[in-house]
Amino acid sequence: MITVFGSANMDLVAYTARAPRLGETVTGRDFRTVPGGKGANQAVAAARAGGRVTFLGAVGADAFGAELRDTLAGAGVDVTLLRRAPGASGIAHIVVDDQGGNSIIVVPGANGTVTGPTAAERDLIAASQALLLQLELPMPAVTAAARAAREAGVPVVLTPAPAQPLPDDLIDAVTLLLPNEHEAAGITGAADPGAALDKLLERVEEAVITLGSEGALYGSRPGERLHVPAVPVQAVDTTAAGDTFAGALAVARAEGRPMPDALRFAAAAAALSVRREGASTSMPLRAEIDAALG
């Protein structure tokens, strides 16, 4: 079982030829509300990729909260312990341009009420094969969940996004760090991904740096290094590519696949996701990933 402790947001997505500059108004061509949030996205991605997944977090007492819960459950994610907080659910305002690029503003809402795992959530984390974390919940909550997993011997996979300083007590509990190249550079101060990977491995046992169209770079403290190329596609919307990669990678590792195979599985899932618009709605099913891998 894979447990995701993280955020659930309703994505308010505007599609336009190009994103507006500061003080500028542009005309969009479409608008959609799409269930998302980095935590919920990773949970849906993992479930669609064939994993048994439980999601821990909070939604608000509003229509968005009900839809977020239904979306997770509809994807096969266990939401038994998903909290319902007073007030509004989290939202993300996303602008997607015609090149598939995006810019995002997140308003935490109910996510901000999560201060740490409950006793029942700690028990569930301890029974998991892996814990997936991101940084859209308050940092003390993320750190507490990571430490609970580490104490139980459960691998911790952290996507350090949105980018922010990582406290030592969090990073010390992380097994696999999964930044993109910009986040890796911010954490290490090294612009070159290879150099950044070396610096990350001074702090964690394993790291994967995602490189967009250039694929992904993996390293471990024993000295293993791998570069897995991306699957060539025409990107329509890259919003959830990183979360799709993370969820699929967690499934592949839980299945005991060697790291090269696990990375190829995750890369195929991410490539399929960018061919479709939306976040959770773009994530591929297991049969699609297997077909893409031949």
Image: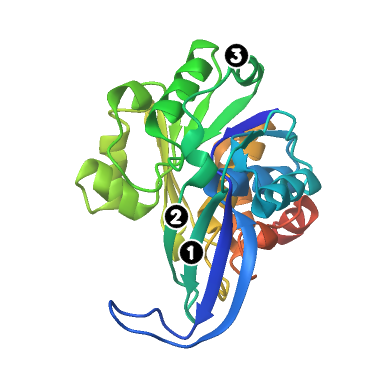
Do residues under tags 3 and 1 come within 8 Å of each other at their CB atoms? no
Mark 3 vs mark 2, CA separation in Å: 28 Å
Q: Do the CB atoms of the residues marked 3 and 2 lie less than 8 Å apart?
A: no
Mark 3: which amino acid? Ala
- Residue 241 in the image: x percent, y percent? 54, 58
Give the quadrant of residue 171.
Answer: top left
Q: Give amino acid for label 1.
A: His
Q: Quadrant of the N terminus?
A: top right
Image position, residue 219 (x, y; %): 40, 37
Q: Residue at x 65, y 44 (%)?
A: 61
- The quarter holding residue 87 reads top right
Residue farthest toward the top in the current orientation of the protein: 151
Q: Which kind of residue does numbered mark 2 sit on?
A: Val
What is the crowding at mark 3: few (fewer than 14 residues within 10 Å), some, or many (at least 20)? few
Q: Distance from label 3 to label 1 (Cα)?
A: 33 Å
Quadrant that contains the C terminus: bottom right
Q: Which residue is mark 3?
A: 119
Say which element carries label 2.
Answer: strand
Q: How many marks?
A: 3
Find residue 20 and report its image quarter: bottom left
- Badge 1: residue crowd in 10 Å (few <14, some 14–19, many ≥20): some
Residue tagged by mark 1?
93
Question: Dots 2 and 1: beta carbons under 8 Å?
Answer: yes
Q: Which residue is mark 2?
A: 106
Q: Earlier in the sequence, mark 3 or mark 2?
A: 2
Above or below, 230 relative to 41: below
Residue 236 rendering spot, x and y as whole percentages:
57, 75
Asked if 286 appears above or below 85 in the picture, the reply is below
Residue 258: horizontal and vertical position, in percent? 60, 35
